[in-house]
Image (tube, grey):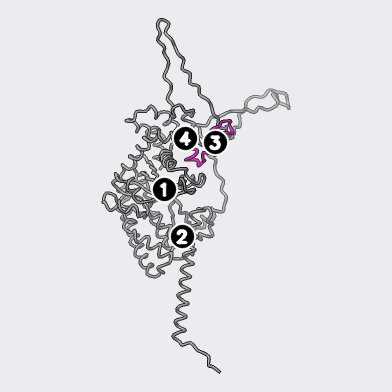
Amino acid sequence: MPKPVIPSTSAASSEVDALRQQVEALTEENEHLKLLVAKYRRMHFGQKAESQAQLGQLDLALAYEPLVIQSSESVKPSPAANDAAVEKRSRKRKPFPETLPRETVTHMPPATDCPDCGGPFKPLGEDVSEMLEYVPASFKVVRHVRPKLACAHCDHIAQADAPSRPIPRGIAGPALLAHMLVGKFCDHLPLYRQSAIYARSGLDLDRALLAEWVGHCHELLSPLVETIRRYVLGGAKVHADDTPLPVLSPGKGRTKTARLWTYVRDDRPAGSDDPPAVWFAYSEDRKGHHPRQHLKSFKGVLQADAYAGFNALYETGDIQEAACWAHVRRKFVDVYRANGAPITVEAIARIATLYGIEARIRGQLPTERRMVRQAEARPRLHELRDWLETQNQRVSRKSGIAEAIGYALNQWSALMYYTTDGQAEIDNNTAERALRSVALGRKNYLFGGSDAGGERAASMYCLIGSAKLNGIDPEAYLSTVLARIADHPINRIDELLPWNLYPAQAALEQKAA
């Protein structure tokens, strides 16, 4: 009878090591997949899809608003905060705007005399309540009549010049064009939906006609868009970001991924009185030469993410890189949502202290902001870097935590820059907020019809976004501009900028900011 083969101790140990390595590899792969799932949920479902149970005891509202946590030692919300979230509080109703038209309906008692004694009634006061009603939008036809007058003694004939139109020989007035543009690029109503809405009023305005109107408006407003571009890039600091825009690819039966780039000038957080503005640019792809072309004349601070296409700009020495702490924070939040690692909790809390400092100095002058940052934020940043380097030695190189730590350490110089410049910001949320309308619109009309459509969208987002940044109704603004710009002198185009056309509203927005 043959003897059983007993494996040697060394062979068994090697097999155990191999199994251990296999388990570690599978664990790392599982962690990576969890991280990808968390990123997918955030990108596609947003904050509302994430329950408080998933976020534990942290408020990780990361999309566009700063995260504020009191300290790294205590990340639990206060009992008062919990009670406030559960308890329903009565809200004091805001009064209706005084600008709204009002209609008074008086309700008199049915009897004119007292039913008890028959005596006459006399006024004793009144009770007044208000109800908000909706008056459906309506169309009207404006008839421009130009009488011809003939001289009674000669052959001279006099007639007034025909009024200019936004679209030569077009039927659309400036208010209708403004309503259509705001509907598509601000309220995210595709043109085919607007066409259906107009049809309910008995108007046959098909989608092709509306698209043609958009093209005419783009050409008419292009000098104003160029003026905003020069203004945005004429500042000392600009926020930059981009977002994908699916566009039909002719002849291929599918879409291509183009890009919309945004560049924002907004120095209100640093106490500046300069009006904010945003400029959008369209490109067929995301190659680095596009932002280099956009910013070829800019000199100053560029606040952006870690996109490699910007690197060539920093090498010239004319543009200073300022990185975004919101992107760093999101890396840790994605890992936290995937596996709840304690390291991420500590990292998020440390970053929150930096945002707490920024909340206190918002609106102050650059010199004051720099002084506070140097005294309070800079020491915390040095401590944070030491802590990140220590943790980096303890975690797996293939883990999501290592990726988040590496992302921060690789950009550390640019992340520290804001502490040396009181005009710079801690993050690039200014640009991300400007792109929010693009993301919302993309969900409704899915893709652009052509590259020309992308160029038109960039122009409209520029004008509408700049008006909104200054607290100006974009529809009223576009209606006024479209009524004037055809006859407006090109050397006085600055007069049609939002903050110049509506200075009172812009001033109020400046104070509110």
In the rendered structure, which amino acid carries the disc numbered 3?
Ser
Residue in the image at 39% along x and 30% along y: 485
Earlier residue among tags 4 and 1: 4
Residue 28 image label: none
In the rendered structure, which amino acid carries the disc numbered 4?
Glu
Residue in the image at 31% along x and 58% along y: 413
> Looking at the image, do the residues carrying marks 3 and 1 touch, with CB atoms under 8 Å apart?
no
Between label 4 and label 1, give the one nearer the viewer: 4
In the rendered structure, which amino acid carries the disc numbered 2?
Asp
Give the residue pinned by disc 1. 259
Residue 212 image label: 4
Distance (Cα) linking label 4 and label 1: 23 Å
Q: Residues within 10 Å of mark 3 (few under 14, many from 20)?
A: many
Between label 2 and label 1, give the one nearer the viewer: 1
Between label 3 and label 4, give the one nearer the viewer: 4
Give the residue pinned by disc 3. 195
In the rendered structure, which amino acid carries the disc numbered 1?
Arg
Distance (Cα) linking label 3 and label 2: 42 Å
> Looking at the image, do the residues carrying marks 4 and 2 touch, with CB atoms under 8 Å apart?
no
The spot of residue 217 in percent (x, y) is 43, 34
Q: Is residue 182 magenta?
A: yes
Q: Secondary structure at mark 2?
A: helix
Q: Is residue 175 magenta?
A: no
**Magenta-tinted stretch:** 181-206
Earlier residue among tags 4 and 2: 4
Farthest left residue? 317
Distance (Cα) linking label 3 and label 1: 27 Å
> Looking at the image, do the residues carrying marks 4 and 1 touch, with CB atoms under 8 Å apart?
no
The spot of residue 406 in percent (x, y) is 37, 63
User: Which is more toward the observer, 379 or 326?
Assistant: 326
Distance (Cα) linking label 4 and label 2: 44 Å
Farthest front residue? 251
